[in-house]
Amino acid sequence: MPVVWPIPYPPKSGDVILMHETVVLCCGVFDVLHAGHLQLLEQARSLGSTLVVGINSDHSVRKGPGRPVNTAEDRAAMLRALRVVDKVVVFEEPTPEALIRMLRPDVYVKGGDYTPESLPEAQAVIDIGGTIALLPLLGGYSTTSTLLRMGYE
């Protein structure tokens, strides 16, 4: 049976979501897309049959003055244009715990700069029986370094 899209977020009481595919969830800000993001998303997609990208809303993340640079709507549009991304969901909370509990991904992906202990959402992944995958980063790439090269920060 195929994944039923779109998934409403936040979920309504009584919503039933049936998934019989390997769903991978990768969450972050994804403010200014760069090669490091692309590698992470390609690796994440290789771990399952469906890649959902959760992005922080503009209000749920502030990474300094003028950040995020792009609005959640623009960030979501750029991610949706990538062939490896099946669905983009914007979440309003500071962490994706509620999204994880609602979506129930088989695999939750973050970059290798994290540890399971540093992820506040790790317990939600464990509670739903999912796996946390920490993938290696592409050296020399970050949104901050990209903005610094552009003279933005």
Image: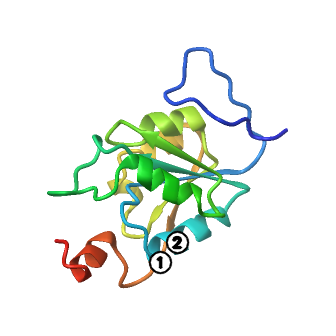
Q: Are marks 1 and 2 in contact (CB under 8 Å)?
A: yes
x then y, percent, for residue 96: 42, 42
User: Which residue sits at x=41%, y=55%?
Assistant: 28
* Residue 95, quarter of the rendered image: top left
- The amino acid at mark 2 is Leu
- Left or right position of 70 against 14: left
x then y, percent, for residue 41: 55, 66
Position of the N terminus by quadrant: top right
User: Which residue sits at x=48%, y=75%?
Assistant: 136
Q: Residues within 10 Å of mark 2 (few under 14, many from 20)?
A: some
x then y, percent, for residue 24: 62, 53
Helix, strand or loop under label 2 = helix
Q: Residues within 10 Å of mark 1 (few under 14, many from 20)?
A: some
x then y, percent, for residue 134: 49, 65
Q: Residue furthest top?
A: 14
Position of the C terminus by quadrant: bottom left
Question: Is residue 109 something one can see in this rendering?
Answer: no
- Left or right position of 145 against 123: left
**Disc number for residue 38:** 2
Q: Residue furthest right?
A: 1
Q: Which residue is mark 1?
A: 35
Pick the residue in front: 61 or 130: 61
- The amino acid at mark 1 is Ala
Pick the residue in front: 143 or 130: 143
